[in-house]
Amino acid sequence: MSKTRNKFSPEVRERAVRMVGEHRADYGSEWEAMTSIASKIGCTAETLRRWCREEASRRTAPAALAADDQARLKLLEREVKELRRANEILRKASAYFAMAELVL
């Protein structure tokens, strides 16, 4: 088992991250805001920075997923186009050979 334990609830983490966003303009830098807020809630500034980065990555994950979905959609559309072209060729070939049998 891990020696470290999670002493901050998810609600405290969420509130701290929200406070950094809300009070960022009150400080000279984001790090200053994190340092001040971290001392008030009883964690290190680095811990709060990590929470903020994790939250930011959670927010941008759907955008990355959407880009991946767009690439997949483009690939599938290309495949559909190729399959339709192949079906048209097969349809024409079938009609050609059917006509050839009727002539014989």
Image (spheres, rainbow, N blue to C red):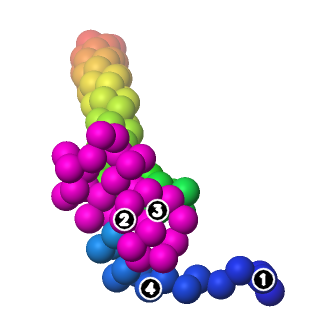
Q: CA distance from mark 4 to mark 2?
A: 16 Å
Is label 4 or label 2 in front? Answer: 2
Q: CA distance from mark 2 to mark 1?
A: 26 Å
Q: In this rendering, would 65 be left or right of 47?
A: left
* Residue 9 tag number: 4
Residues marked 3 and 2 touching at CB (< 8 Å):
yes
- Among numbered discs 1 and 3, the one appearing first in the sequence: 1
Residue 81 in sight here = yes
The residue to which callout 1 is attached is 3
The residue to which callout 2 is attached is 37
Mark 1 nearby-residue class (10 Å; few <14, some 14–19, many ≥20): few
Type of amino acid at the residue the image marks with label 3: Leu
- Among numbered discs 2 and 1, the one appearing first in the sequence: 1
The kind of secondary structure the magenta stretch mainly shows is helix
Type of amino acid at the residue the image marks with label 2: Ile
Mark 3 nearby-residue class (10 Å; few <14, some 14–19, many ≥20): many
In the rendered view, tell whether residue 97 sits above or below residue 39: above
Q: CA distance from mark 4 to mark 1?
A: 18 Å
The residue to which callout 3 is attached is 48
Indicate the position of residue 66 as horizontal and vertical percent values: 29, 44
Type of amino acid at the residue the image marks with label 4: Ser
The residue nearer to you, when weighing 89 against 95, is 89
Magenta highlight range:
17-45
Residue placed at 27% from the left, 47% from the top?
27
Indicate the position of residue 41 as horizontal and vertical percent values: 41, 76
Disc 1 secondary structure class: loop
Type of amino acid at the residue the image marks with label 1: Lys
Disc 4 secondary structure class: loop
